Amino acid sequence: MSTFPTSSVQEARAALAARLRELRLDAGITGKELANRCGWSVAKSSRIENAVTAPSDADVRAWCTACGAGDQAPDLIAANRQADSMYVQWKRLQRTGMKQLQEASTPRYESTRLFRVYASHVIPGYLQTPGYATALMGTIAGFRGTPDDVSEAVEARLRRSRVVHEGDHRFATLIEEHVLHHRIGDPEVMAGQLGSLLATMALPSMSLGIIPATVSREQVMWPLEQFTVFDDVRIHVELLAAKVTVTEPGELDIYLRGFARLTELAVYGAEARTLILRAIEALR
C-alpha cells in the first residue's frame, strides 16, 4: 500500500479522502454498500477514505458513480493527480531517459528570480561542468537502469544552466565541504569542476557559501537532504528514490528556516576559496 513521506502529500491525500467521504455521506450509504457498488472490498473503501491508500483515477470515478455524483469525478481526479505529483519516483520521471526531465524543468528555471540551493550530495546542476555532469548522469543511468541519453541530457542541462549568466536571476548556494571531495569522474574532471566553482564566485548574481566539515552543528542545523527553493513558493527535495515537491506554506517555512540556519554555518569569500583550493590540492 502507498504511504506518503511528507506532510504536503499527506495533507493533499487527506483533503481528497475527506471529499470522497462527504460524497458517501451525502449519498446516504455505508462503506459496505459503497464497496458493493464499486465491486471491491470494504477494506479498500476504508483505506481510501482514511487516506491510507492512494486511489487510482478509476477508483475515484467508480466512487463518484456509486454516490450518484459522477459529475464531480473530473475535479476529484485532477486533485488526485496533483497530490500524486508531489512525490514522484525517479524511475517514473526518467523512464524515457534524462534529457526530457532537464527540458521539462527549463521553464521553471527561466521564470524563477531567486534560487536557494542546499547541496549535501553533489554540486548543484546549474553549476556543473560538462565533464562532471556527464560522469554524474552516467552513474545515475547505470544505477537506475534508465535509457542512456546522457550526452543529450548533459546538453539540455547546460542549456538550462544559462540562467546563471543570463537575465535577472539571483542564486544563494550552500555546499557542504565534503561535496568538494566526492570523486565524481576522474581527478581531471573534479579539478575542472572545482576550478569552475572558483570562477562562479565572481558572478554578481551568485552567493556561494561552503559549510566546513569541521563546523559545530550542536545548536544550529544538522546536514539535510539536497533541495532547491524556487522563489520561496516551491521546493524540490531530492531523495534517493524520488523527487518530492513541497508547496504547503507550513512545510515551506520549515525548509526556509533550515536554509537560514545552514547559512549561518557557511563561510564565504576568501575562506570559501581556501576550502575549494584545498579540495583541488587533495586531487594531486
Image (cartoon, rainbow, N blue to C red):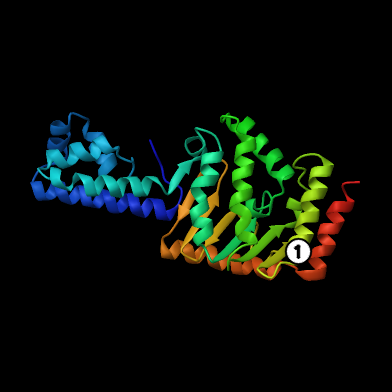
- Which of the two residues, 6 or 207, is positioned nearer the viewer here? 207
Residue in view at x 17 percent, y 32 percent = 38
- Is residue 220 in view? no
Q: Residue furthest right?
A: 284
Residue 200 is at least partly visible in this image:
yes
Question: How many numbered marks does the figure carry?
Answer: 1
Q: Position of residue 113 (x, y in %)?
A: 54, 66
Question: Residue at coordinates 43% horizontally, 59% vertically from top-left?
Answer: 247
Query: In which quadrant of the rendered image does the N terminus lie?
Result: top left
Q: Work out whether 32 lies above or below 129.
A: above
Q: Is residue 29 above or below residue 113?
A: above
Query: Residue 69: x percent and y percent?
Result: 12, 45
Report whether 71 appears left or right of 124. Answer: left
Q: Which amino acid type corresponds to the residue marked 1 in the rendered image?
A: Val
Q: Is residue 19 above or below residue 112?
A: above
Dot 1 surroundings within 10 Å: few (below 14), some, or many (20 or more)?
few
Give the image quarter of residue 149: top right
**Disc 1 secondary structure class:** loop
Q: Residue at x 51, y 64 (%)?
A: 254
In percent of width and height, residue 213 lies at 77, 58
Q: Quadrant of residue 35?
A: top left
* Residue located at (36% from left, 49% from top): 83
Q: Which residue is mark 1?
A: 215
Q: Position of residue 115 (x, y in %)?
A: 57, 63
Q: Is residue 240 left or right of residue 15?
A: right
Closer-to-camera residue (111/217): 111
